[in-house]
Every structure is written in structure tokens, then in C-alpha cells.
Amino acid sequence: MKLNNLCLLKKNEADRTPFLLKELDSKNTKILSANAINILEILSEKEMYPKEIARVLGMNEQKVYYYVNNLKKAGLVDVVGEKTYGGLTARYFSATSDGAFVLWKKKDAEKTKTEGKENPLSVFSKNSFSNTIFVLGAPMHHGKQMAKAEDEKLAILIALFAGSFSKSCSVSLSNVKYDIDMTENDLKKNLIIIGGPAINKTTALINRHLAVKFLKKDDFYYALYSAISRKKYSDENCGFIEKIINPFNKYSAILVLGGRRSTGTEAAVFFLINKFKSFEAGNQYNKNIFSKIVKGFDEDNDGIVDKAEELE
């Protein structure tokens, strides 16, 4: 069990959708005042900026900022977007979970985190990839960027690597789809997505749910931004790997590997395969998040990434 990411079935037997709960450090319980909980309830339903929250609750705007900042520090809300109004930038917030819990039996909890930690790729290779789709960017010009992908070889490498954690590996053509062919039902399965949002629209679709997001200006994705470290990475050779709960189905997971350019995506794949223990250890700023930002290098100048350096 991953303690900061616990699923609990709803009480209504007809509704099998689970709650997503987040572990709250005991020292942060004092922030959960009645006003803070009211704000969390609102942000679990709709993304809002503080002035808008203040208007809904009839609360002083500065107090809302105070509560939101504390909730953000505790990891219960996060920035999911920005908009400019009259020259001022408003940051939109959303709840990061459906609720929170405090665990006071820490000894057994730490044992579970270390000894019982599940391999982050096992969910995809379970039952021979029967419920997993490899999502590739289409190899023709598509989308607003009119970009095309050539990532089939990367998908093969990832399938072989992920399959090494399974007792039996049987991938068929039904397990591989281009982004333009994905259906609403496909999105609810376990997904391994390859490529950045410019060449893979499924990556663009989940971008706001990621801890490492692609920043966009007009129709151009110009940098990676980490909500974990609050750092921006704009080098064209930068890529990232991240595993999240599927926002379309909380019973499924998503692994996404992408980059600003194709070299960044290659770097992410290279890092996952050659430095998997590092990915398995979690982000250096938050070990409970499976997320890495890397930079690729072509040391022998043959046009292929042969080294990946961890940036975060």
C-alpha cells in the first residue's frame, strides 16, 4: 500500500469509484480548520482562484490566500492553471485528493514503504499487459503543431523492459494505439504514453494532472515545469518520466515518458531502462512521487542518446 495514495471505496455500493486519500503529516492537522475544509470541498469540485473562492464563501480574500497557501504547503491543493485578467495573473487551484488521513502507527508504516513497496511498472505488465495500452504519437502530421512522431522503437524497448518484471509477456497489436485513435474507453485503461504533447495528444490531455507539466505559450510548448521543486527546465534535450493514477479511472495507472523534443523523450526511455532503481526511488524532492526529469546526451555523435543525466 502506498500511504500517500490510498484508495477507499465509497459507501454507496452502486458507486464503485474510490476516494483518493492523501496522507497528512500529524504536524499539519492544525491547518484543517472549518474554513480550510470548506475551501477543500469547493476545490474538489471545481478549479478556482482565491478571489473567486472568497466570493463564493463570503470570506475576506486575504484570509482565503492564507488558507490556500497553508493547504498548498501541506500538499492538499496545487496550482493547475493561470489566467490573466486586466494585466494581473490569477492562479487556479484544485484539490489534489478527495480527502486526507493521519497515520500514527509509524513503525509498521515505514516497513510497508520499504519492504512492501510495489514495483512501479508491475501494474502495467500484470496479466501480460492485457489491460495496458501503449499510446504513441501518430506518424503523420497532426494537431495544432502539425507534428509527427517516430517513437515505435521506443515503445518496443519499454515493452521489453516492462515485460521483464512479468512471468509471462504477451503484447498484441490491440495493446498499441496511436493518439488519434484513442477512445473514451481506452483512456480508462492502464496507459504507457510515449512522447510530449506536441506529438501525442494523450499527453496533452493529461498534462494538467502531472507533477511535471509542459508549459505552453500560444501553441508552442516551451518548457517543463516541476510543481514539486517549482523549477523550470527549457533545454530541448530535457525529458521526464512520471507515473500517476489515471485521472479517468482511479483503478488504473499511467506512465508517461516525454520530452521537449525527440531527444528528450529518448533520454527519458534511456533513463528508465538503464537507471530504473533511481526512478523507483522516487523524486529527489518527494520520494512518494514517481517522477524524474532528465537530460539526454549523444556522446559519440551518432544521433542516438547514449547518456541521461538526472536533473530532478
Image (spheres, helix red, strand yellow):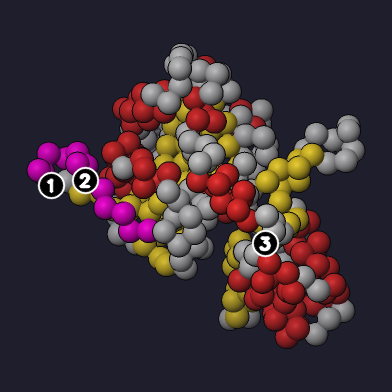
Quarter holding the N terminus is top right
Provide the secondary structure element on which disc 2 rests.
strand
Looking at the image, is 251 positioned above or below residue 207? above
> Marks 1 and 2, Cα distance to the nearest angstrom?
7 Å
The percent coordinates of residue 65 (x first, y second) are: 69, 80
Provide the secondary structure element on which disc 3 rests.
loop
Magenta stretch in the rendered image: 299-312
Q: Which three-letter amino acid code belongs to the residue tagged 1?
A: Glu
Question: In this image, 36 relative to 176: left or right?
Answer: right
Q: Callout 3: 10 Å neighbours few (<14), some, many (20+)? A: some
Q: Which residue is mark 3?
A: 24
Q: Nearer the viewer, residue 45 or 274?
A: 274
Per the picture, the main secondary structure of the magenta-coloured stretch is loop
* Residue 24 forms part of the magenta stretch: no
> Which numbered mark, 3 or 2, is in the foreground of this view?
3
Q: Which residue is mark 1?
A: 299
Q: Which three-letter amino acid code belongs to the residue tagged 3?
A: Leu
Q: Nearer the viewer, residue 17 or 165?
A: 165
Looking at the image, is 42 positioned above or below residue 14? below
Residue most toward the front?
107
Q: Which three-letter amino acid code belongs to the residue tagged 2?
A: Lys
The percent coordinates of residue 123 (x first, y second) are: 54, 30
Please report the residue visible at 85 percent of the width from the left and 72 percent of the height from the top. Answer: 34
Q: Are marks 1 and 2 in contact (CB under 8 Å)?
A: yes
Q: Which residue is mark 2?
A: 307
Based on the displayed image, in which of its 4 quarters is residue 56 positioned? bottom right
Q: Nearer the viewer, residue 1 or 201?
A: 1
